[in-house]
Amino acid sequence: MTLGPSAQQWAAAVAAVRSAGLDDEIQLICHVNPDGDALGSMLGFGLGLRRLGFTRVRATFPGDFVVPTPYQRLPGADLLVPEPDAFADPRLVLVFDVASESRLGALAGRLAAAPASVVLDHHASNTGFGGVRLVDPQAAATSVVADGLLSRLGVPLDPEIAECLYVALATDTGSFKFDMTTVSVHELAARLIATGIRPGEISRQIFDSKPFGAMKLTGEVLGRAVLEPAAAGGRGMVWTYATLADLERYGQPPYVLDTLIDPVRSVAEADVSVVVKQVAAGEWSVSLRSKGAVDVSGVAVSQGGGGHRLAAGFTGYGEPSDVVDTVRRLVDEHLN
């Protein structure tokens, strides 16, 4: 079993944060196309830094500055700035939910140049970059690591910080359904709810609100799903794809496809589920899930991606059939 951060690493992270002056520039960064864990962990921690008295805190992510609608009203959203407005020479950089520097794009230079940096992550595929590394593959979400550091810094939970961390925890555990949902996960959720946040209202906003066009798009993409019972050593694989033309036809932004993997992974006859989403001509974002027979993180890492044993992703190229051919071959090589 891979252990989490050591006492020395926690202490080093605390020292790195406290090395910054209250008026120093502090830059928070999460991965491209941020999800609930990336944004929730980053903004919750940013609010914690404000509680400590830091006055110059900004948060950003690489690429187009598009915050998915469900997360636009998160507490601390005012910390968010487009990539060009990130501090040019921050005193301290903190990175959230990023398994490799490639997911930082041009912002990787900020990390390398900063006098102090801390990486908070929970991906087993983390490549070990950054100054101080708080990587816990046993954590259900990066928000678990963020909560650990906030606690060691003496920041008490309040409803705003708690809402951010709860959104992060709920999204990365699939509303507390995934295998990483442990006793400690529920204990953290209980502490967060005890601050007065309303989990039912949060869940409706994050999981149960979708534009009509997004629902229609989901129906079409699910309608073209293919089940391959003989794949994955006979455990079965199901896959589908979505194109930029699909998004344009229904007038939807790309992030509406982020949760498409959930209904696909529910297929009883398949251990492995795959959703291939177009991001540019000949370029596809690939989401992988397994119910246990396949280590999909191995598949993803072999293609330059990353993730966990049961949930991972990478960038593929060519046509959807080319990407699926590659996945089909690699799945057989990573059977548990």
Image: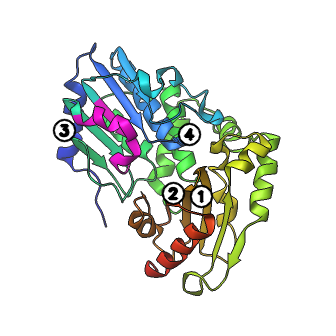
Disc 4 marks which amino acid?
Answer: Val
Q: Can the viewer see residue 147 in this picture?
A: no
Disc 2: CA contacts within 10 A as few (<14), some (14-19) or many (>=20): some
Q: Is residue 294 left or right of residue 9?
A: right
Q: Is residue 67 left or right of residue 303?
A: right
Determine which residue is flagged by label 2: 181
Closer to the chain start, of discs 1 and 3, is 3
Closer to the chain start, of discs 1 and 4, is 4
C-alpha span from label 1 to label 2? 7 Å
Disc 2 marks which amino acid?
Answer: Thr
Which numbered circle lies on residue 81?
Answer: none
Determine which residue is flagged by label 4: 167
What range of the chain is rendered magenta?
Answer: 93-112
Which numbered circle lies on residue 177?
Answer: 1
Q: Give how far across and how far down residue 268 sits, in percent.
A: 69, 74
Determine which residue is flagged by label 3: 12
Q: Can the viewer see residue 178 in this picture?
A: yes
